[in-house]
Image: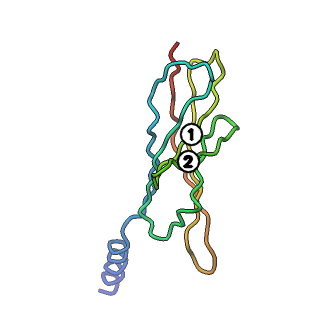
Amino acid sequence: MRFGHIIFCLLSSVLFMGCVYQRITNLTPGALPRNVSGFYPVEIIWESNQRTVRYETVQPQVMIGTNSFPMKNTPKMTNRWEALVPVPTPAPELRYRIKVNWKYNAIPAPVGNSQLSEEFRLLINN
């Protein structure tokens, strides 16, 4: 009987806590025409239902190999970020990931966290 109470308490606490999620949504099209500048836009939405996130600390970046390019907040939007990333002229595609760093409130001080997306591919059409 005691074991049943322990299981019930554990399952109840999981049910009432809910699930915390963070989600990266890539808004960049899968293909873009080649342009003369060699820079291409990457745009994302980052969402979280964690109530303790300090949104002023959210710092997404585009990761291309060992290079990273910081993203800036899209004007008039609260959860969208954008960056222009370079692609060498002969390259037919760009493979990249998005990494988002943020802090959330904790005791005694804010704690950092991060999320890394799966690899995305941008085709460059001639």
Say what secondary structure mark 2 lies in: strand
**Residue 45 at x, y percent in the picture:** 45, 48
Give x and y (percent) for residue 67: 69, 38
Q: Which of 8 and 22 is in front in this view?
A: 22
Q: Give the farthest residue toward the top.
A: 126
The answer to whether 68 appears left or right of 46 in the picture is: right
Q: Where is residue 71 in the image (x, y as percent from the top left)?
A: 59, 45
Classify mark 1: helix, strand or loop: strand
Residue 12 in the image, given as x and y percentages of width and height: 32, 77
Left or right: 115 in relation to 76: right
Disc nearer the start of the sequence (1/2) = 1
Residue beneath disc 1: 97
- What amino acid is found at the position of numbered circle 1 in the picture? Arg
Question: Does residue 90 lie above or below 83 as drawn?
Answer: above
Which of 74 and 90 lies nearest the eye of the viewer? 74
Mark 1 and mark 2: span between their CA atoms? 7 Å
Residue named by callout 2: 116
Residue drawn at x 61%, y 28% is: 39
**CB atoms at circles 1 and 2 under 8 Å apart?**
yes
What residue is rendered at 47% in x and 34% in y? Answer: 28
Residue at image x 46%, y 48%?
24
Residue 88: quadrant of the picture: top right
